[in-house]
Image (tube, coloured by chain):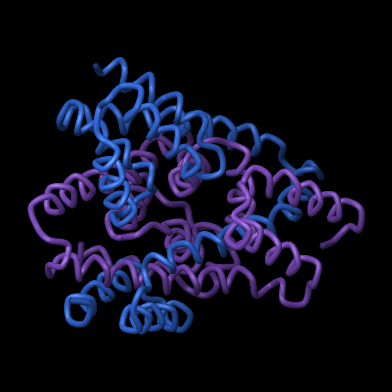
Chain colours: A blue, B purple
Amino acid sequence: MYYQLVSVFAVLSLLGFGGGNAIIPQMFTESVHHYHWLTASQFSQFYAMARMAPGPTTTISALVGYAVGGLPGAAVAAGAMFIPSGIIVTIGGALWSRLGEHPFRKIFAAGMAPVVIGLLWSGTLVIALGGVQSWRAGAIAATALVLTLRTKASVVILILGGGALGLLFLR
Amino acid sequence: MAAAIPAREAAATRESVVLTEVRPTLFDLVRTFALISVTAFGGGQLTSMRREMVSRLGWLSDEEFVEMLSLLPTMPGPLPVSMACLVGYKFQRVIGAAVSLFACIIPAFVMLILIAKIYLSQAPGSLLFAMFRGCAAGVVGINVANAFELTTPYFRLPVALVFISATAYAVSGLHLSLELVLLILAPLSIGLRAWRGKV
């Protein structure tokens, strides 16, 4: 059982280029249709939870693992999901820093910069569509926006402040 | 958690944003990534990480942050976790990368299991979910602010602005796959940069 979890999530981990949301459909196919670990409606419920919870959406792997084998299953699935890609990224980063002052490094980084900033904007839009569904939530977001630009407040304070306002106004 | 905050505020000054001589210890890496991991409801940790690492703690300059960010689409893995690995490796080598990876996922993992337990036992209209929605709204504000701050250096560079908006529009507006967008726009942008010597 753990072997199956590892084999599914470790492969997905290595396929998750450009973030990881792209592998959710394949995760659905593997865990619902192929291994019958959970039903389609359970999967979509888990997806909603993973979207809402902190951390990347691929933490849904932990919930699938939990459904299969409780807490150990969750740990195994999450480990298989995040460790292989983490190793590759660390090796990639190490090789990259070995380039030193090579001109390609500067050209690549400068050329990619506008593209990845555009990606950040599109990620922001996705989060905004999910997180701001009323004018009150919009007001909380706007407050956090201004405080981020104008103060040095830590994100933890800003987010928990948003949570406190949510407790008051988003019931 | 509350005791850690005054020290963090003392660590960051305007100057450290320019001169990045701050070298985080393993403990600094764990504290920062774990706090973000446990609070960034609704996603968008990457911008929270920039806020802490670049704007507040002065670990990285924006140039270094964006360079690391630009490497991520060429490798697998969720962006915030991969970013933590790169930052961990930069300051504390392999141990730093491993520690940062776990600091990024374990708190989120615990929160998610807790949320799942609550979610299955409680209606999503409860007080706790009101708090989660408030946190998520706060994350949205932080995201917009950081994306804006990263964009400001490009306000005088129309070509770069075109690439920023084209990427955002292609992914969010046209719903093209990320791979396709990157395969078309990244070589164009890098090629232009190499050809003109500037963007």
Camera-side residue: A56 or B91?
A56
Q: Say which quadrant the C terminus of chain A sits in.
A: bottom left
Camera-side residue: B175 or B21?
B175
> Looking at the rendering, which quadrant does residue B128 occupy?
bottom left
At a point 44% along the width and 38% down the height, the residue shown is A25
Residue at the right extreme, as displayed: B195
At a point 55% along the width and 38% down the height, the residue shown is A17
| Relative height, residue A25 to residue A160 (above, below) | above
| Relative height, residue A113 to residue B179 (above, below) | below
Camera-side residue: A102 or A78?
A78
Please state the total of marks drawn on the protein image.
0
Task: Look at the image and tell me whether residue B176 can be seen.
Answer: yes
Q: Say which quadrant the N terminus of chain A sits in.
A: top left
Task: Look at the image and tell me whether residue B6 can be seen.
Answer: no
Q: Is A153 placed left or right of B113 in the picture?
A: right
Camera-side residue: B187 or A101?
B187
| Relative height, residue B72 to residue A126 (above, below) | above
At a point 12% along the width and 50% down the height, the residue shown is B120
| Relative height, residue A147 to residue B39 (above, below) | below
At a point 24% along the width and 72% down the height, the residue shown is A163
Residue A149 image offset from top left, x and y in percent: 48, 80
Residue at the left extreme, as displayed: B121
Residue A86 image offset from top left, x and y in percent: 46, 34
Q: Is B22 placed left or right of B101 in the picture?
A: right
Residue A85 image offset from top left, x and y in percent: 47, 32
Q: Is B129 placed left or right of B22 in the picture?
A: left
